[in-house]
Amino acid sequence: MNMQYEIAKMVTGNQISDEEIDKELALLSQEQWNEQCIMLDKMMKEHVENCKDKPAEDVMLQDLTNVGAANNVSETTVWIAYLKWMEVEYSSR
């Protein structure tokens, strides 16, 4: 059991299998995921800042869902890709 996957499933309310997450992650190259994560990061920060009337979690989940739909992957997979991207992005600073 991958604990990061389990947490992402809980956050997104999705019960996708670990194997399906791995398959979806493989659909895009690392460069494509990096581009999507940069875009997602900007979107979430902007939307959370501008949508004060909604809980931040709801705004972020909608952004994850939108990016997932645009790439034909689940919001859970997008969340995993984003967490991995943040780990690399912030550890290199």
Image: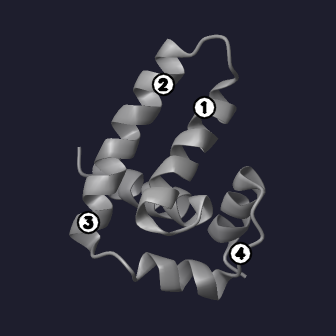
Q: Is residue 33 above or below residue 51?
A: below
Cα distance between the residues tagged 1 and 4: 21 Å
Q: Which mark is residue 59?
A: 1
In the structure shown, which secondary structural element does the residue marked by tag 2 occupy?
Answer: helix
Cα distance between the residues tagged 2 and 4: 26 Å
Q: Residue at x 51, y 59 (%)?
A: 69
Q: Amino acid at mark 3?
A: Gln
Q: Which residue is mark 2?
A: 47
Q: Residue at x 40, y 34 (%)?
A: 43
Give coordinates of residue 62: x percent, y percent: 59, 41
Q: Amino acid at mark 1?
A: Val
93 and 44: which one is in front?
44
Q: With 46 as the anchor, is 64 left or right in this view?
A: right
Q: Residues within 10 Å of mark 1 (few under 14, many from 20)?
A: many
Mark 1 or mark 2: which comes first in sequence? 2
Cα distance between the residues tagged 1 and 3: 23 Å
Q: Amino acid at mark 2?
A: His
Q: Quadrant of residue 34?
A: bottom left
Q: Residue at x 62, y 88 (%)?
A: 19
Give coordinates of residue 13: x percent, y percent: 78, 56
Q: Which residue is mark 4?
A: 16
Q: Quadrant of residue 74?
A: bottom right
85 and 49: which one is in front?
49
